[in-house]
Image (spheres, rainbow, N blue to C red):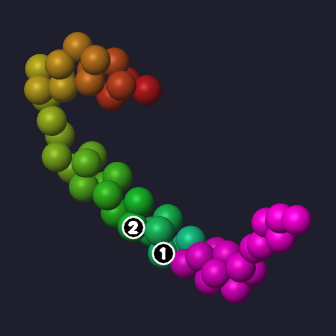
Amino acid sequence: MSPGMQTNIEAISGYARKLPHYEQEADKFRDLVDAADVTDEAWGIMGAFAKQG
């Protein structure tokens, strides 16, 4: 018989404890992208559409 699925609870807990760090890093990255102020022409058609979203 198959042993089934096993979960490493400590690994999941460790990852969950690191999530605030990843959120802060994402905020820094967003701020850098905003500061770049890329022109609409540089985005191209699809990029301009995505930028508006």
Residue 43 belongs to magenta span: no
> Residue 6's spot in the image, x, y percent?
77, 72
Q: Position of residue 35 (x, y in %)?
A: 21, 50
Q: Is residue 7 magenta?
A: yes
Compared to residue 17, the image places residue 24 above or below, namely: above
Q: In the image, 16: left or right of 41?
A: right
> Residue at the spot x=49%, y=65% of the render?
23
Image-quadrant location for residue 31: bottom left
Identify the amino acid type marked 1.
Answer: His
Residue 39, can we see it? Answer: yes
Looking at this view, is 31 or 3 the one in front?
3
Location of residue 22 in the rendering, given as x and y in whole percent from the top left corner:
47, 68
Q: Is label 2 in contact with label 1 (beta carbons under 8 Å)?
A: yes
Q: Amino acid at mark 2?
A: Glu
Which residue matches tag 1?
21
The residue under the point 64% across, 81% down is 11
Residue at 39% in and 67% down: 25
- Which image quarter is the C terminus in? top left
Categorize mark 1 by other alpha carbons within 10 Å: few (<14), some (14-19), many (20+).
few
Name the residue carrying label 2.
25
Quarter residue 40 falls in: top left
Q: Magenta residues?
A: 1-18
Q: Is residue 13 visible?
A: no
Check the image and name the residue furthest to the top.
Answer: 45
17 relative position to 26: left or right: right
Viewer-proximal residue among 50 and 4? 4
The image quarter containing residue 18 is bottom right
